Amino acid sequence: MTTVELPEESDTLRFGRRLGAVLEPGDLVLLAGPLGAGKTVLAKGIAEGLGVTGRVSSPTFIIAREHRPAPGGRGIPLVHVDAYRLGGDLDQLDDLDLDTSLVDAAVVIEWGEGAGERLSADHLLIRLERRDDDARLATVLPHGAWRDRQLA
């Protein structure tokens, strides 16, 4: 377990970029934390680190959005999921067929703790919290094969 202080939004983006730069096809990242904790900002940074196309925003109403690799990027697609509206309905998560996406894409699931773990024992859980001074804290919890990996 590692804790990273993220005083400014730019720090959250930079942390995400570093993480995106080491993600590989099949990687699963679960983001947890209350509203306003910085999950979508972190997902934007991850997308920048992967070098994918398209505007990254919370996919709350469409549940999942795929971002294709940009020319000159790392060649790894990103599947960005927002599990908030699923309300813990694991059948709906299964309906997204994310285990298929885990073959060739990196998958990031906002509100993923408690549901996303069933997709892979090898996942990275990042819990974000917002302090009273508006800084964020990211607690990084590696599971399975992530315990042996460097995060940048």
Image: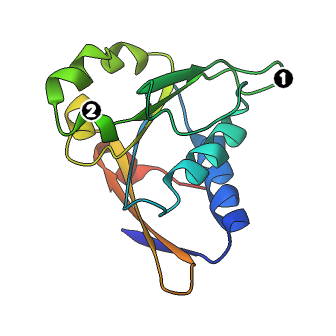
Residue 90 image point, x, y percent: 16, 29
Tell me which corner region of the image, top left, top right, bottom left or bottom right, holds residue 75: top right
Return the x and y of residue 3 as percentages of the image width and height.
45, 74
Left or right: residue 133 versus residue 140 is right
Q: Quadrant of the N terminus?
A: bottom left
Q: Which mark is residue 72?
A: 1
| Residue 112 place in picture, x, y as percent | 32, 43
As drawn, 72 above or below 134: above
Residue located 45% across and 24% down the image: 62
Foreground residue, 112 or 117? Answer: 112
Q: Exactly how many numbered labels are in the figure?
A: 2
- Residue located beneath label 2 in the image: 120
| Residue type highlighted by circle 1 | Gly
Q: Are marks 2 and 1 in contact (CB under 8 Å)?
A: no
Up the image or down, 119 lies above or below 95; here it is below
In terms of secondary structure, where does tag 1 sit?
A: loop
Whether residue 121 is visible here, answered yes or no, is no
Image spot of residue 10 (x, y percent):
73, 64
Q: Say whether residue 45 is left or right of residue 121.
A: right
